[in-house]
Each structure stands twice: as C-alpha cells, then as structure tokens.
Amino acid sequence: LRLFVSEGNMIKGYIGVCIEITEKKLFLAGGLNSGNVAAAVKCVQPDVVDISSGVEYEDVLIKGKDESKVKAFINAVNN
C-alpha cells in the first residue's frame, strides 16, 4: 500500500504499520478492494480512501468500473 499525505509527500509502508499524521489529510491508496479495505481503514484510519483498479471489470475488454464491486467496496468501508 502507498500512503499519501495531502501535500503530495509519499510514504511507502505496510498495512501493519500505522502512521500518525497531524494537520494533514491522509490518503490511503494502492491495492485496495472490498476484501482488504476494512482492515486497512481500521489500521490506518485515513481521511480519504482512493479506489480505482480494485473495482474495475475483470474482463479487460470491458472498460470502466463494475457497479457490484463499487457497492461491495463501499459496504466494506461503511461496516
């Protein structure tokens, strides 16, 4: 996973390492999907969660986001 703070400074780390950042927004991005986002959010407690490839269609011929994957991701974050 890559952890980003709002000023664009990148900190590389692992889900198992929680980082305390004050007075900045913490963005969590990279490799997130409905199966791992809940644990990542619980550990890191980010202000923002970024999702992209984790909700795309598995068939590379279909462009865009898979609505069922987007819903599963949102449910995982909210629960």
Image (cartoon, rainbow, N blue to C red):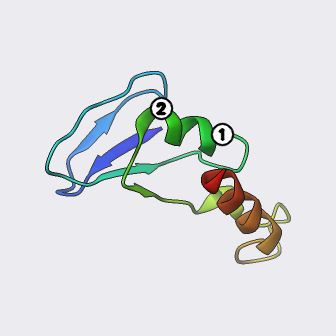
Q: Residue at x 23, y 57 (%)?
A: 6
Q: Earlier in the sequence, mark 2 or mark 1?
A: 1
Q: Residue furthest top?
A: 16
Q: Secondary structure at mark 2?
A: helix
- Mark 1 neighbour density, 10 Å: few (under 14) some (14–19) many (20 or more): some
Q: Would you say 41 lies left or right of 6 here?
A: right
- Mark 2 neighbour density, 10 Å: few (under 14) some (14–19) many (20 or more): some
Q: Is residue 51 above or below residue 2?
A: below
Q: Are marks 2 and 1 in contact (CB under 8 Å)?
A: no
Q: Residue furthest front?
A: 79
Q: In this view of the protein, which residue sits in the foreground, 17 or 61?
A: 17
Residue 48 is situated, as x and y percent measured from the top left of the image, at 40, 58
Instruction: For marks 2 and 1, give the CA distance.
Output: 11 Å
Q: Residue at x 48, y 38 (%)?
A: 1
Q: In this view of the protein, which residue sits in the foreground, 47 or 67?
A: 47
Q: Amino acid at mark 2?
A: Cys
Q: Which residue is mark 2?
A: 43
* Residue 36, disc: 1
Q: Would you say 44 lies left or right of 78 here?
A: left
Q: Amino acid at mark 1?
A: Asn
Q: Secondary structure at mark 1?
A: loop
Q: Quadrant of residue 8?
A: bottom left
Q: Quadrant of residue 7?
A: bottom left
